[in-house]
Amino acid sequence: MQLNVPRLLFLALAGFLLFLTDCSNRAGLAIHLNELFARADIGRVDMSVAMSARSRTGIADFPARTGEIARIASVLRLVEVRDISAASLSQVRGWLKQARKEYGHELLRLPPGVHVYHSAVRAPSLQLRDGTRFKYLVLIWDAVRERAVVLVEYAYG
């Protein structure tokens, strides 16, 4: 068996560049979410983030208290979901279904007692200073554990 050194080098470089891109995307997501949270007078939030390798979606997990969630929901004009099975929420259910395939976070399964909020699609409140915008934002909050998860998708253009 003969090794194709140029091809192996190319594959190694491509893999490394994908790794760097993913690291950059994760850092960018944390920066973007902290920009939104700052609008709600919440200081910098330490969060664990992940970006999809197959789409423009990302997820962040962070500690959150009642007052912080209320301010985030108000400033970003999020709507609280009372009944996730409502016909009008089929799009939100679709986002969550896809996210459960991508990410293993337990709150995405909507355990009993969690609060779910969502934005309108391409809401003006999701526009960032650098011109980036999120297509949507879903916030899932576990009040008992004081943990929250944000699911977002970056918009095109």
Image: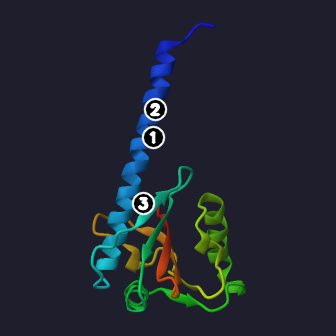
Return the residue at label 2.
14
For residue 106, side relative to residue 41 (left or right)? right
Q: In front: 130, or 115?
A: 115
Say if mark 1 contacts mark 2, CB within 8 Å: yes
- Percent across and percent down for residue 110 are 64, 78
Numbered circle sitting on residue 76: none
For the residues carrying marks 2 and 3, which lies nearer the camera in this image? Answer: 2
Q: Secondary structure at mark 1?
A: helix
Q: Give the residue type that dot 2 points to.
A: Ala
Count of picture labels:
3
Question: What is the quadrant of the N terminus in the image?
Answer: top right
Return the residue at label 1.
18
Return the residue at label 3.
157
**Residue drawn at the location 61% of the way across and 62% of the way down:** 104
Q: Residues within 10 Å of mark 1 (few under 14, many from 20)?
A: few
- Percent across and percent down for residue 23 are 39, 49
